[in-house]
Image (tube, rainbow, N blue to C red):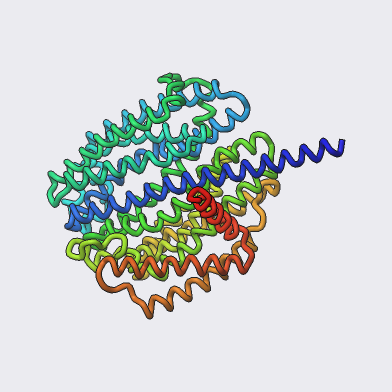
Amino acid sequence: MTENKSIEDKNSIDSGKKKGRSFALSAIIVGLGTFITKFSGLLRQIVVADRFSQGIYRDSFDIAFTLPDLVFNLLIGGAIYSTIAPFLSAQRALGKEKEAVKTVSIFISVASVVMITFSIIGTIFSGPFYSLYALGQTKEIKPEVLTMAAQASKFLFPQIFFMMLAAFCNGIYVAYRKFAVSSFGPFFYNVLSIIAIFVLGGNSPRNLVMTTGGILVITILYSVIQYFLGFKQMKHFRFIFKPGDSEFLKLFRRAIPILISASIVQINAVVLKRFALPFGDGNVYGYSNASTIWQIPYSVFVVAVTTVMTPELAGDYVSKRFSKASELVAHSLKSALFMTIPSAAFIAVMSLDVVKAVFQWNPAKYTDQDAATAATFLLGFCIAIIGATVVHVFNQAFYAIGMTKVPLLAGLVGLVINPLACQVMVTLGVGPLSLSLAYSFTTICQMVMLSMIYCRRKELAPRGIIVFLLKAALSVAVMSLIVFIFDKFIPAHGGKITQLTIIAGKGVAAVVIYFAMAVVLKMEEATEWIEKFKAKLLKKTAKKA
């Protein structure tokens, strides 16, 4: 009897280790896919700066995406990953895959009809919609910016329908653990978008409209390719328009808070860009540059982890494995924060150099003033990197366990705090920095609220977070001080290659110092990363031998 129990325990431990390795591998795949997608997104903005070298056209191009993206998130955006993936994963864990496929088919079908309708309305009435966007600030905003944005958006409203189809494919792939397909597809879309912008972009209204038209064609191609890459799974989903189906209505009611929560994020972005317009040409684009940069560590380390965590957590919760669920959230939170905390600190110390390294490839088209504008916004976003990490992990955890109203409540709080904080700071004369600081302040408020509510469920609450944060704070403080001293003695001046080399050297030094401190303080996360690196190095050495 004792021997059998020992064997069972050993099998359980082996199974746990295999699952841990599988989780880590999946997170690495998603992280790599997210990284190259974000990197290609950076290249896209660099090409935008080159082809639309005048601030008025850059701002028009950026604003053209604002309202279509808002419609996308209002109607379906956030529900795809946060509803479809956990729902499918949970139903598969319960052996109800066939029923779940039918429900999701109805969900996709209804969403498609609604999205087509709104895409048509947006295309026809784009002019009035963008006029409403500037309501109350018509004197401070150049009318030609909004006119050109409205014209360019006529191709972007239809585009969101095809983006929805591609996103549905990716959400389904996540549920089936096909992380490679879901993670690398957006990279393909970005590459084709870069080509379209490079070929069709230019400083004229005609080039602006031609570019968004090219992006529409590319999105159609992207959605078709995403469908056929996972045809084995996708072939089971059919067009079933039954909005009265009881199971669909249950799923839809679960999705509503998620839809609103995702929309709030987009609404906040719209509001902040509107605040940026009166500060002058190029501020909207500078805000977007800063937003792109801070979201790189956020997306690579946070979204990658939660993409893998969400379906796993949904399965553990529905199977009442609460201890494993608690461990999973704790591990995900610490893994994400372990990398985003030093990223935020490094960006704060090196904000201007980071912007120049990423975007200033042609100083005549992307000037020092452009870089300074983006760096100002970026400095204010540094706190948001950490706050948004915690918010996103807890949001996905709430979605996985079916408590979708909590993230909605946090989103509504943010919807009130964000513009109020921004308006107060602008009134106090803080300037453009007000926008990103207000966003960071909002994420901190949401972080505190979500953490307190989630930890009320003691059986699900992540453990060991306070000790982890204290160790991470000490490690990053030492790292930041040394990087700051390096920066004073070795500024990133000279040609582009020299500039990149110096910044890369400081980045490597920051990583080494941070990890060294983490090892001294016995942080498990540092040990895990080092062990993974050693294992890969030994594996490569063995192959060569």
The image quadrant that residue 240 belongs to is: top left
Is any atom of residue 360 visible in this view?
Answer: yes
- Camera-side residue: 93 or 391? 93
Check the image and report above or below for 375 versus 537.
below
Find residue 13 and report its horizontal and vertical position in percent. 71, 43
> Against 69, is 292 above or below?
below
* Image spot of residue 249 (x, y percent): 51, 26
**Can you tell which quarter of the image residue 12 is in?**
top right
- Image coords of residue 39 (percent x, y): 35, 52
Is any atom of residue 425 visible in this view?
no
Q: Residue placed at 12% from the left, 44% from the top?
A: 206
Residue at the far front in the pictured view: 545
310 and 149: which is toward the camera: 310
114 left or right of 197 in image: right
Residue at 28%, 48% (x, y): give it.
133
Q: Nearer the viewer, residue 172 or 204?
A: 172
User: Looking at the image, is 334 positioned above or below residue 217?
Assistant: below
Tally of numbered tags: 0
Can you say which quadrant of the picture contains the N terminus? top right
Residue at the extreme bottom: 489
Q: Image check: 162 left or right of 55? A: right
- Residue 60 in the figure: left or right of residue 355: left
Is 355 or 80 nearer to us in this picture?
A: 355
At 34% across and 67% down in the image, what residue appears?
501
Residue 21 appears left or right of 408: right
Rendered residue at 26%/36% (across/down): 218
Q: Position of residue 95 (x, y in %)?
A: 61, 24
